[in-house]
Every structure is written in C-alpha cells, then in structure tokens.
Image (tube, rainbow, N blue to C red):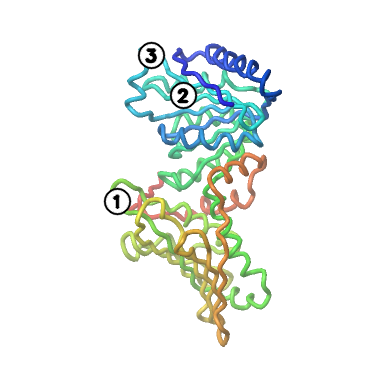
C-alpha cells in the first residue's frame, strides 16, 4: 500500500521527517487489517534527474529496486517544469513524501524539485535526511559534467556513485573526473558506469574470438580495426563518442597496442583513423559515423577485426536491425563464413542499476581502460566536440 502527501516547507530535514512519521502512522493503522509489514532499510539512494519525466521514470523503478535494496530514496529534480515552479510558495519547496509497502518491505521516497537559487543548500539538506549507518548511493541520472558543483558535493558523502558516461559532454574531461573519483582513497568512492555495463556483450563477443586456439594465427596478425557507430547529427545534440573510446581503449589496452599518431580526420564527421603499433606490426583503426534516425538509436553498430597481410581473414560483431540481437561472423581463407545470432543481453535500466548497486568494488578492467585512454591521450578531434584544456 502506498501513502503520500504533498508537503510545502522550508528546506528543513525535521519537517520532512515529521511528514514521514505521519505516513508511517497511517501505515501502522492499516497493518491492523492487512497483517504485519516490515519497515527495513539497507541503504540511502540519492537520484538526481533532469526533469519531471525523469523523476517519474525513477519513481517507477524504485519499487523494483526496493525488493533487494529497501531504504530511503531521495529524488531531486534539477530542472523542474515552469508549471511545477509556479506552485512554490515564496521560497518554500513543495515536496512529495511517499511511504510504500506494496513489496512487503516498506521504504520511503522524497520527490523534490530544485528551486532557482536554492541549489547550494541541497547537499546539506539531503545529508540531514540520510540514515548515516547505511551506505549512500548517488545515482546521477543527469548530464555528467566534471564541473557540476552539486555532483561534487553529493559525491563527497556517497560511498557509491552510479553514472552514465553516454551523457558526457566531454568524454576526455569526464573520464579524467571518473579517474579522480576512483582515486579518492579517503572517501572510498566506487564509481559504476551504466554505459560500461551496456558494452559487456560487445566485450564478451570480441574476447570469445581469442578463446579458440585455431583463430590465434589470424588474430595475432590483425592489421586493421573498424568501429562503426551511429549518431543523430543536429545542432541540438553533441556527438558522444564515449562508447567508441571505451571499446577502442579496451581492445588497445588488453592487446598492448601503442599509438603512433593522434586521431586523424579523413572526412569531416564521417571517417577518422589512428595508427597503432603492436609488437613489430602496424594497425590502422578506422572510426566510421553514420546518421541515426533518433538519439535513442545512436550507438555502436559494428566492430571488425581484419588480418589482410599475414593470414587473411576477418572477425566481426554487429548489432542486428531489431536492436535486440548481435551477430558474430568469422571469415577465414578456404572456409565457409561462420555466422551466429545471439540475444543482446544488456537488460533494462532497472536491471543494470540494480546490479550496479550490488557491486561494492571497483572494476579493474574499466579503470585500466580509462587509465590507458588518459595516459596515451587518445582523444577525439576538436571538430567533433572534443577539447582538451
């Protein structure tokens, strides 16, 4: 059973706590007829969203998360609609308090819009509402900018930070910020990246080629790599190449490639390449961009590993047209091309977030990939929205 109230109040933690106590009293009365329900907490979750639509999406996800992670959920709307702001009284904030026992384990939700000028007070206010004996998870479901003051403040008292690097305005600067967070030994931040989790099927598919001994002579002679991805090109969207950089950085760091050049622009916003060294050989990596019908359809489309000089052959992983399956192809000289279709088991947003909330350790391969990209300074050209300062 879900109980909620609209609360108009100053940014005062005690007033909010009193509202929750009122709702718990109603639940206690209901328990007399419906049986005993347990109030239990194991963590605090702070979800920072862009707008009301984002708040609704997170609010719909919380009942699923609460089955494994009951606790106190605080949703902050950074850019509420004008209609919502007009309901504010003077400098007061209208919050929605929820107590939900629909999953047999009760939990609490606070949904609060940000009022212009009050953002500096939010970290202190939110910190006053936390159960300090439990871990604090910051889910930054908003554009990730290293210079965002609110992110920096919230991450200081969060033991785990969940981000989505697909929203990076600048992957180069964003990656540097993630490395900085992971290196904060004293505050013990653990950064989990939803975008990296989405790439798990791609990494498994490529790694699977190297698990078969008969393919090793061909894979050791790789001299060309092509990474294809799509993006909706318009003045309203920046070109986000974080997935491309992740896959390229992961491959290069795992296989010991060394950059011989920076990103070379072959054709504006269409084709780029970089020259790499591997042992005594040379590898040319191409990045091809194709237009996407919508922002939702943007992302990786195909990765091809080619061996043309020593032992000709190619290995490819591609996203199928339905967006739900992956196709792997292997073509070797004198043999029939082998094809396999498998499900793209990425999971929904709630599945990924739920898994990331269960992980309390840093991902070494993720960190090594970021460190490789940072150390070798393999960055996009300024013409594609990337700058390094």
- Picture coordinates of residue 236, whole percent (x, y): 30, 46
Binning the other alpha carbons within 10 Å of mark 1 as few (below 14), some (14 to 19) or many (20 upward) gives few
The residue that label 2 is drawn on is 112
Nearer-the-camera pick, 126 or 269: 126
Which residue shows up at 54% across the image and 55% down it? 199
Which residue is farthest front? 33
Q: Are marks 2 and 1 in contact (CB under 8 Å)?
A: no
Q: Is residue 320 left or right of residue 30?
A: left
Closer to viewer: mark 2 or mark 3: 2
Which residue shows up at 38% across the image and 30% down it? 79
Kindly state the secondary structure of the residue where label 3 is placed. loop
- Picture coordinates of residue 235, whole percent (x, y): 28, 48
Q: Is residue 243 above or below residue 19?
A: below
The residue that label 1 is drawn on is 234
Q: Is residue 306 left or right of residue 360?
A: left
Q: CA distance from mark 2 to mark 3?
A: 14 Å
Which residue is farthest left? 235
Q: Is residue 67 above or below residue 222?
A: above
Counting labels gives 3
Q: Is residue 35 left or right of residue 389?
A: right
Q: CA distance from mark 2 to mark 1?
A: 32 Å
- The tag earlier along the polypeptide, 2 or 3, is 3
- Disc sitting over residue 360 in the figure: none
Q: CA distance from mark 3 to mark 1?
A: 38 Å
- The tag earlier along the polypeptide, 2 or 1, is 2
Q: Is residue 371 visible?
A: no
Kindly state the secondary structure of the residue where label 2 is placed. strand
Quadrant where the N terminus sits is: top right
Binning the other alpha carbons within 10 Å of mark 2 as few (below 14), some (14 to 19) or many (20 upward) gives many
The residue that label 3 is drawn on is 91
Q: Are marks 3 and 1 in contact (CB under 8 Å)?
A: no
Q: Is residue 99 visible?
A: yes
């Amino acid at each position: 059973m879900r109980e909620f109230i609209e609360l108009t109040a100053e940014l005062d933690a005690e007033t909010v706590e009193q509202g929750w106590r009122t709702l718990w009293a109603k639940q206690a009365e209901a328990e007399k007829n419906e049986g005993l329900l347990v109030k239990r907490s194991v963590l605090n979750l702070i979800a920072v969203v862009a707008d009301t639509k984002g708040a609704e999406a997170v609010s719909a996800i919380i009942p699923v998360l609460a089955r494994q992670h009951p606790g106190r959920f605080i949703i902050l709307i950074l850019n509420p609609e004008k209609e919502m702001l007009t309901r504010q009284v003077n400098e007061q904030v209208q919050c929605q308090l929820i107590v939900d026992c629909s999953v047999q384990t009760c939990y609490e939700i606070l949904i609060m819009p940000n009022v212009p000028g009050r953002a500096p007070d939010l970290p202190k206010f939110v910190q006053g509402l936390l159960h300090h004996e439990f871990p604090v998870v910051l889910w930054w479901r908003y554009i990730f900018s290293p210079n965002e003051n609110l992110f920096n403040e919230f991450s200081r008292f969060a033991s785990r930070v969940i981000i989505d690097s697909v929203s990076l305005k600048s992957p180069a600067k964003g990656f540097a910020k993630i490395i900085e967070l992971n290196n904060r030994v004293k505050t013990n931040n653990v950064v989990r990246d939803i975008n990296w989790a989405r790439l798990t099927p791609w990494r498994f598919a490529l790694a699977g080629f190297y698990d078969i001994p008969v393919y090793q002579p061909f894979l050791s002679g790789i001299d060309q790599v092509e990474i294809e991805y799509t993006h909706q090109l318009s003045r309203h969207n920046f070109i986000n190449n974080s997935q491309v950089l992740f896959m390229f950085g992961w491959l290069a760091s795992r296989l010991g490639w060394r950059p011989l050049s920076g990103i070379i622009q072959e054709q504006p916003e269409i084709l780029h390449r970089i020259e790499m060294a591997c042992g005594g050989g040379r590898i040319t990596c191409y990045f091809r961009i194709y237009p996407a019908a919508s922002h939702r359809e943007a992302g990786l489309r195909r990765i091809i590993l080619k061996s043309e000089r020593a032992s000709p052959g190619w290995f490819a992983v591609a996203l199928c047209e339905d967006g739900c399956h992956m196709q792997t192809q292997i073509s070797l000289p004198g043999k029939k091309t082998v094809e396999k279709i498998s499900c793209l088991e990425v999971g929904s947003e709630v599945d990924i977030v739920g898994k990331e909330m269960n992980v309390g350790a840093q991902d070494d391969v993720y960190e090594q990939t970021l460190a490789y990209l940072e150390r070798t300074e393999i960055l996009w050209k300024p013409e594609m929205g990337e700058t390094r300062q």
